[in-house]
Amino acid sequence: MQQKYLIRIHPLIVTFTLLRYPARGWYPAFANMGRWVMRPFQAEGLQFQKMMGCGRNFGLIPDLSAYVFLGVWADEQAARLFFESDRWRTLCKSTKEVGTLYMNPLRSHGAWDGQNPFDVASPSRSTGFPVAVLTRATLRLAALPDFWRHIPQARQRLKAHADDLLLAIGVGEKPFTQQCTVSVWKDEKTIDQFAYRQSGHKEVVRLTRERRWYSEELFARFAVVGSEGTFSGKPLLPETVL
């Protein structure tokens, strides 16, 4: 079932699209990734874009059946026109399923490839919408063993909040060194409880700073104002939350 999408906060739109391919489509899917690297999308209103692979359960093992396209758009119309374009339809032709989140940035700090693509004039809070959290980092080579050693602990902490967590996925641009996570929560209150009151999460944040795991990092929050399509055989988000 498709959710209706209406701009609620400001025109800037961020889309997060998950593409799942059947086993026989793994090679074409990987080839699509290579084509994008050689020739990124050209579309009116597209301000920033990334095509990324997915990891299994936030780990080092890649999920060759799943990829993510992230786009930052001047407005909703630009995003909609692109998703109706021939090139996008060709990319999706062999997919098993496709699901997209539509999001308005609430606040963001840090850099991604030297820029902050989600920067807004004034930070704000979500007003009744689910909230997505995106973290992205380029890891220092010397920090890789230490960083990946703590991933299982972080994964367990997320599972402990399963009732409040609507979606969580680990993706990346380059294996091992350029990582991105996206999680969607019922509301900002539950995020604050996880981020600021859970000692385990605060410990990881402290280690990040003390041990200088990242050479570049970005943290952003979004109001999830629309969702359509499916992933893993079910709606990307429960129909009751939007």
Image (spheres, grey):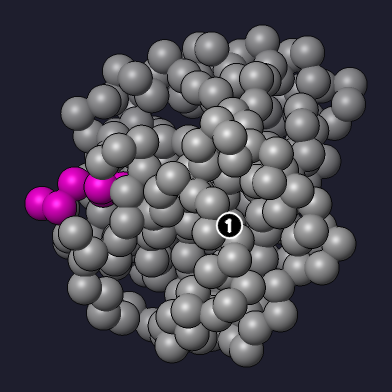
Is residue 62 covered in magenta?
Answer: no
Whether residue 120 is visible here, answered yes or no, is no
Residue 68 at x, y percent in the picture: 56, 50
Would residue 179 appear left or right of 175 to someone viewing this image? Answer: left
Residue 132 at x, y percent in the picture: 39, 51
Residue 153 at x, y percent in the picture: 50, 12
Q: Which residues are magenta?
A: 235-240
* Residue at the image point whose x is 41% and y is 41% from the top: 183
For residue 27, what is the image quadrant? top right
Q: 98 or 178, which is in the foreground? A: 98
* Residue at the image point whose x is 26% and y is 25% from the top: 162
Would residue 146 appear left or right of 151 to someone viewing this image? Answer: right
Whether residue 149 is visible here, answered yes or no, is yes
Compared to residue 44, the image places residue 159 above or below, namely: above
Compared to residue 25, the image places residue 175 above or below, namely: above
Mark 1 is on which residue type?
Phe
Image quarter where the N terminus lies is: bottom left
Image quarter where the C terminus lies is: bottom left
- For label 1, the SS is strand
Residue 140 at x, y percent in the picture: 85, 31
Q: Which residue is mark 1?
A: 69
